[in-house]
Image: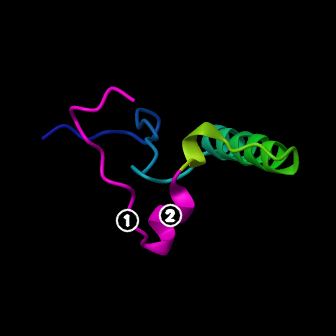
Amino acid sequence: MPQNSSNDAEIVPIPGQENDEERRRIRQSNERDQRAERDGRDAPHNVGYDEAADGTTPKPIDPLDDN
């Protein structure tokens, strides 16, 4: 069986483990959300989060209603 030397090993991040690039992306997203919140706006990807976290049920959607 061939043996791998330590020089041939490729370092692969553990799935789900954050790296510097991922941390930077998360930090920028958080800063953008906080800026929007300070300006009184909702960040599009956060709309409905509070209701979901509180466990409130959204208003039912009528599939035949165009409004």
Residues marked 1 and 2 touching at CB (< 8 Å): no
Q: Secondary structure at mark 2?
A: helix
Vertical arrangement, residue 37 with respect to residue 43, above or below: below
The residues colored magenta run 48-67
Q: Residue at x 69, y 41 (%)?
A: 29
10 Å crowding of disc 1: few (<14), some (14-19), many (20+)? few
Tag 1: residue type?
Answer: Thr
Label ID, residue 18: none
Q: Residue at x 56, y 41 (%)?
A: 45
Q: Is residue 62 left or right of residue 8?
A: left
The quarter of the image holding the N terminus is top left
Residue on which disc 1 sits = 57
Residue 61 on image: x %, y %:
30, 45
Q: Residue at x 56, y 47 (%)?
A: 47
Label ID, residue 51: 2
Q: Is residue 36 left or right of residue 5?
A: right
